[in-house]
């Protein structure tokens, strides 16, 4: 059985990471203007990640997620310097898994790896920014992340609504992620299985946008 691993990326992984980034933006962000998604093409992402890997910042880390020799996702952790998040020290800036690998332990492993890296560098609490129309913000709330701000983010002159979330106590977050990893890996690394790994339903989701009608457990096959 192949094991899903989250490992530090090298220059040799950049082309694969750029491809994954483009594929996931097209798959996950259908609510964004098409011209914005189109401009974030492979050439754009290749330049973005090549520049970073040649000159990484302090307490920053780019990871590639692999099943065997195949790249199935990536993630990027960095310090938080956002003026709208003055209490945040670390940021889970990017985390993407290819569609057919959603439902495996790749999602919780990428979050756990980034959180542990930032904790090691004393960048706690953690911040995640999520587009308002991205349904995965409900999954973050189920893990205990707390929404603390709504804002309009400008990308290429286009304004997009997004929410900021701050991390729960890390031992609580680690416990929940490890339970998910155990459940997923216990049934094998099999992409696109219908069965979902889920957290138990929590009625106290800290997101004012969640209603009784929308407060549902989020299947792992929705993980971006």
Image: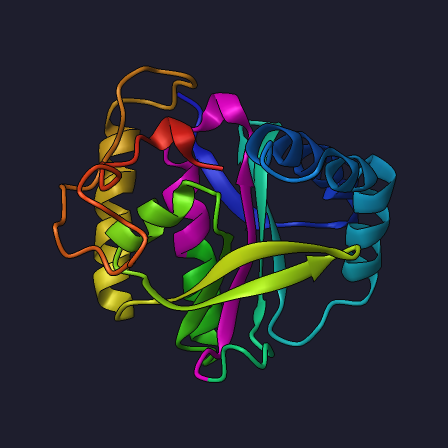
Q: Position of residue 58 (x, y in %)?
A: 66, 76
Residue 42 to residue 90: above or below: above
Is residue 76 toward the left or the right of residue 128 in the image? right
Residue in view at x 55 percent, y 56 percent? 161
Residue in view at x 77 percent, y 52 percent? 49
Along the line of sight, which residue is nearer the eye, 19 or 208?
208
**Res 35 → quadrant:** top right
Q: Position of residue 106 (x, y in %)?
A: 43, 37
- Magenta residues? 87-112
Residue 95 to residue 171: above or below: above
Is residue 38 toward the left or the right of residue 123 in the image? right
Q: Position of residue 24 (x, y in %)?
A: 61, 33
**Res 23 → quadrant:** top right
| Residue 103 within the magenta-colored segment of the rendering | yes
Residue in view at x 45 percent, y 81 percent? 122
Along the line of sight, which residue is nearer the eye, 207 or 222?
207
Q: Position of residue 82 (x, y in %)?
A: 59, 77
């Amino acid at each position: 059985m192949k094991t899903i691993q989250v490992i530090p990326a090298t220059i040799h992984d950049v082309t694969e990471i750029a491809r994954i980034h483009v594929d996931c933006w097209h798959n996950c962000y259908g609510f964004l203007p098409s011209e914005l998604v189109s401009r974030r093409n492979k050439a754009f992402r290749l330049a973005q990640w090549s520049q970073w890997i040649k000159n990484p910042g302090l307490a920053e880390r780019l990871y590639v997620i692999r099943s065997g020799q195949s790249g199935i996702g990536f993630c990027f952790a960095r310090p938080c310097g956002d003026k709208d998040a003055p209490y945040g020290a670390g940021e889970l800036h990017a985390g993407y898994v290819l569609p057919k690998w959603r439902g495996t332990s790749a999602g919780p492993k990428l979050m756990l790896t980034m959180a542990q890296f930032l904790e090691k560098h004393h960048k706690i609490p953690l911040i995640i920014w999520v587009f308002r129309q991205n349904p995965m913000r409900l999954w973050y709330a189920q893990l205990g992340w707390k929404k603390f701000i709504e804002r309009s983010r400008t990308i290429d002159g286009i304004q997009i609504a997004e929410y900021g979330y701050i991390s729960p106590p890390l031992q609580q977050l680690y416990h929940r992620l490890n339970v998910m990893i155990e459940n997923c890996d216990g049934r094998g690394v099999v992409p696109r299985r219908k069965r979902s790994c889920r957290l138990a339903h929590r009625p106290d989701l800290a997101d004012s946008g969640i209603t009784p009608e929308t407060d549902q457990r989020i299947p792992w096959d929705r993980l971006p």
